[in-house]
Image: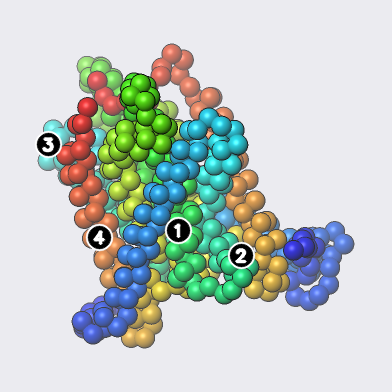
């Protein structure tokens, strides 16, 4: 078997090879294409992660509300139903739901590009997993934190905003790191609704060039690089936000 | 927008969905059994302390865990014919892929399961004059399996959800069955909804069962 890495310098339209590998004069090479596909993968993942973080933290916090009255119990139930709903449907099925079903039921969403719809699908799917981590993180806090906030006369919202969440979110950084790496991997399902991301590139370029191994190796390498970069960024955030002398692990449970 | 469910009947389910569901089930069962078998071997390799075993096993597991499953499915579909020397169907390729991919995840579960066994158990086995293989088979692994049953089953539910990804190579699983039915009846919305509902009830039901089981097997020490 012989390698032929020149395939990345080849034009996507004809048999020409670009000497600099990037297309010149309006021509696109496979290198241009894989780079733009990488951009799509990262954009879908980033937007999905943003949605997942906002919804996941909200739903995770709702699930830990004390069952004081009807409203907090209702909100906690909403959080629980949310998590079960989005965790128990395969991500590919959720992508199809957002792409085919949701725009038909909610006409406002009809004009949205598939890139947004896939990000929503990934975001909702991942939010259920982040909500689970946030709930565990809040549960791992010493109970005294909540009591202290109440003793200070903070409302429930204030105690979450100023006391519970700032500490809990620091605890859940490691699991959220792995969810961030997962969302990059899961973004590969976007191929199914024709978002021009890395996996769709891999499938199409493999067909066109029949240099599948080189193409797949390139795509796989980009996925690995993306995941490692996210891992490093999250490690940086973790060390920057660390509270001195406060070590609690989410798995250890409450007091 | 009107939803029409009238085309759902037994005939349609049998014609399109049932064979897909059976394949999803087959893939889940074979993937779980094969994954646990090879995953346990990988875990024993990673814990062996011999560099010739730990390094390749660690590299394999970390590689599988950092690549999207869809890409792994595509890789195997591309490479299997040249490895085996003959063309191979999408379904067979999917089964091999799932065993290879899931064994990396089951390896990590089994590794933490084995590590959760107190070291005294190993010493006790050795003191009884057991060989390494006897010690593992009769003392350590049975306990590790039992401790890890809930996690192994949760991973099986994830595996069942992941079977839908064989869509990438056109294998006929349950999701594909619903999709084909939707195309043939011109009712894609209803069939995607039905697929979501069915997947939800299967996965939700199984996760409830795991939770009950977890409470039963939790206290063994």
Residue nearer the viewer, B9 or A123: B9
Q: Secondary structure at mark 1?
A: helix
Badge nearest the viewer, 1 or 2: 2
- Residue A49 visible (yes or no): no
Circle 3 residues within 10 Å: few <14, some 14–19, many ≥20? few
Question: Any mark on residue B98, and which?
Answer: 1
Q: Where residue B117 appears, x then y in whole percent?
A: 34, 28
Q: How is the image coloured?
A: rainbow
Quadrant holding the C terminus of chain A: top left
Q: Going from the N terminus, do you reach mark 4 or mark 1 first?
A: 1
Circle 2 residues within 10 Å: few <14, some 14–19, many ≥20? few
* Residue at 55% over, 62% down: B76
Q: Is residue A39 above or below residue B20?
A: above
Marks 3 and 4, Cα distance to the nearest angstrom?
33 Å
Question: Any mark on residue A69, and which?
Answer: 3
Task: State left or right for residue A83 relative to residue B65.
Answer: left
Can you tell which quarter of the image residue B165 is in?
bottom left
Circle 1 residues within 10 Å: few <14, some 14–19, many ≥20? many
Q: Secondary structure at mark 2?
A: helix
* Residue at 55% over, 51% down: B67
Question: Any mark on residue B83, and which?
Answer: 2
Marks 3 and 2, Cα distance to the nearest angstrom?
64 Å
């Amino acid at each position: 078997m012989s390698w032929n890495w020149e395939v990345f310098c080849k034009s996507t339209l004809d048999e020409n090879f670009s000497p600099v590998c990037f297309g010149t004069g309006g021509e696109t090479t496979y290198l241009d294409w894989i780079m733009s596909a990488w951009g799509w993968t990262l954009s879908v993942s980033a937007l999905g992660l943003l949605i997942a973080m906002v919804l996941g933290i909200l739903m995770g916090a709702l699930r830990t509300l004390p069952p004081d009255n009807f409203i907090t119990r209702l909100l906690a139930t909403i959080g629980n139903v949310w998590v079960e709903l989005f965790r128990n449907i395969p991500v590919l099925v959720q992508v199809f739901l957002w792409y085919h079903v949701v725009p038909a039921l909610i006409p406002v969403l009809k004009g949205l590009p598939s890139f947004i719809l896939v990000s929503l699908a990934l975001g909702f799917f991942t939010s259920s997993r982040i909500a689970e981590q946030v709930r565990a993180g809040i549960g791992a806090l010493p109970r005294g934190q909540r009591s202290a906030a109440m003793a200070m006369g903070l409302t429930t919202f204030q105690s979450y905003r100023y006391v519970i969440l700032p500490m809990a979110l620091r605890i859940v950084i490691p699991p959220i790191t792995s969810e961030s790496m997962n969302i990059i991997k899961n973004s590969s399902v976007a191929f199914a609704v024709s978002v021009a991301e890395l996996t769709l590139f891999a499938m199409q370029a493999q067909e066109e060039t029949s240099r599948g191994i080189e193409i797949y190796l390139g795509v796989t390498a980009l996925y690995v690089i993306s995941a490692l970069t996210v891992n490093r960024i999250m490690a940086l955030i973790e060390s920057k936000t660390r509270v001195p002398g406060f070590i609690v692990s989410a798995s250890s449970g409450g007091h | 927008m009107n939803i029409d469910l009238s085309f759902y009947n037994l005939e349609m389910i049998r014609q399109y969905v049932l064979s897909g569901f059976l394949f999803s089930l087959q893939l889940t069962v074979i993937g779980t059994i094969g994954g646990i078998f090879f995953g346990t071997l990988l875990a024993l390799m990673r814990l062996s302390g011999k560099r010739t075993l730990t390094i390749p096993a660690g590299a394999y597991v970390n590689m599988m865990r950092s690549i999207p499953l869809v890409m792994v499915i595509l890789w195997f579909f591309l490479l299997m014919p040249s490895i085996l020397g003959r063309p191979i169907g999408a379904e067979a390729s999917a089964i091999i892929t799932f065993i290879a991919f899931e064994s990396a995840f089951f390896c990590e579960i089994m590794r933490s399961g084995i590590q959760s066994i107190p070291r005294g158990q190993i010493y006790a086995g050795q003191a009884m004059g057991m060989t390494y293989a006897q010690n593992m088979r009769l003392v350590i692994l049975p306990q590790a399996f039992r401790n890890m049953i809930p996690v192994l089953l949760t991973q099986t539910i994830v595996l069942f959800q992941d079977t839908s990804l064989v869509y990438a190579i056109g294998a006929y699983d349950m999701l594909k069955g619903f999709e084909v039915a939707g195309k043939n009846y011109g009712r894609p919305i209803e069939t995607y909804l039905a697929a979501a509902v069915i997947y939800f009830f299967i996965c939700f039901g199984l996760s409830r069962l795991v939770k009950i089981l977890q409470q039963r097997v939790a206290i063994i020490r």
